[in-house]
């Protein structure tokens, strides 16, 4: 099978995603200065994932450094309270054509703003805070300073069990 046949193109909002065929059912879930993020299903693992397409990562040196830093940090940081990088790819086949970078991460069910709206008891809220602080401590012990903390929450067992993870996209 040729490399190109491993990819397909789909439009999400105003953005074209050329992604591996294993990722299906793309739905937009957010966007920021560095790119747009979609939820998808990894058909090989049956796992829900988030796919971030970096916006013009090589338009200038600053963008290239940010893209490299984000990829490198996500690859290096491994902690149960920090969102992990599952995959990274580009559909381009040559260095001359290289322009798109896609980062595949764990997909969380909710963010901190949504969780704050829930009716949580003191014990559950304390546990979430503890997990966030563990993630921050791990980043600091690795010499990583964060600009903005983005906390995403994953829920288990019908919103009974909570586990928080920090997204290191803003590091």
Image (cartoon, grey):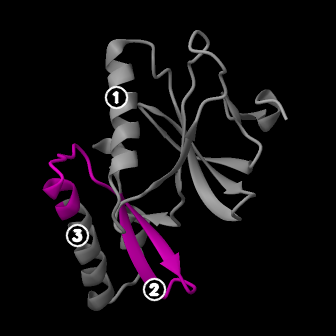
Seen in the picture, residue 13 relative to 133 is either above or below; the reply is above
Q: Which residue is located at x 69 percent, y 63 percent?
A: 45
For the N terminus, the quadrant is top right
Q: Earlier in the sequence, mark 3 or mark 1?
A: 1
Q: Which residue is located at x 36 percent, y 69 percent?
A: 80
Seen in the picture, residue 72 relative to 122 is either above or below; the reply is above
Q: Which residue is located at x 34 percent, y 67 percent?
A: 81
For the C terminus, the quadrant is top left
Badge 3: residue crowd in 10 Å (few <14, some 14–19, many ≥20) = some
Whole-Å distance between the Cαs marked 3 and 1? 25 Å
Say which residue label 2 marks: 161
Q: Is residue 158 magenta?
A: yes
- Name the side, left or right, on which 123 lies relative to 75: left
Whole-Å distance between the Cαs marked 2 and 3? 18 Å
Say which residue label 1 marks: 66
Secondary element at tag 1: helix
Badge 2: residue crowd in 10 Å (few <14, some 14–19, many ≥20) = few
Q: Is residue 90 magenta?
A: no
Seen in the picture, residue 41 relative to 122 is either above or below; the reply is above
| Residue 49 lies in quadrant | bottom right
- Name the side, left or right, on which 102 lies relative to 20: left
Measuring from the top left, give residue 127's x and y in whole percent: 28, 82
Q: Which mark is residue 134?
A: 3
In front of the other: 3 or 47: 3
Secondary element at tag 2: strand
User: Which residues are drawn in magenta?
Assistant: 137-166
In front of the other: 117 or 25: 25
Q: Earlier in the sequence, mark 2 or mark 1?
A: 1
Whole-Å distance between the Cαs marked 2 and 1? 35 Å
Measuring from the top left, give residue 118's x and y in whole percent: 42, 78
Q: Which residue is located at x 56 percent, y 86 percent?
A: 157
Measuring from the top left, give residue 125's x and y in whole percent: 29, 81
């Amino acid at each position: 099978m040729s490399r190109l046949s491993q990819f397909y193109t789909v439009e999400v909002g105003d953005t074209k995603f050329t992604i591996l065929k294993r990722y299906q059912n793309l739905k937009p879930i957010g966007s920021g200065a560095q790119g747009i993020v979609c939820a998808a299903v990894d058909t090989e693992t049956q796992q829900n994932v988030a796919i971030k397409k970096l916006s013009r990562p090589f338009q200038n040196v600053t963008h290239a450094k940010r893209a490299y830093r984000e990829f490198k940090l996500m690859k290096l940081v491994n902690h149960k309270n920090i969102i992990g990088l599952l995959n990274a790819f580009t559909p381009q086949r040559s260095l001359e054509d290289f322009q798109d970078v896609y980062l595949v991460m764990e997909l969380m069910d909710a963010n901190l703003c949504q969780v704050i709206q829930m009716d949580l008891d003191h014990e559950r809220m304390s546990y979430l805070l503890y997990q966030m602080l563990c993630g921050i401590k791990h980043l600091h012990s690795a010499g990583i300073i964060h600009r903005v903390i983005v906390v995403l929450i994953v829920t288990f067992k019908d919103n009974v069990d909570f586990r928080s993870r920090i997204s290191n996209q803003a590091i």
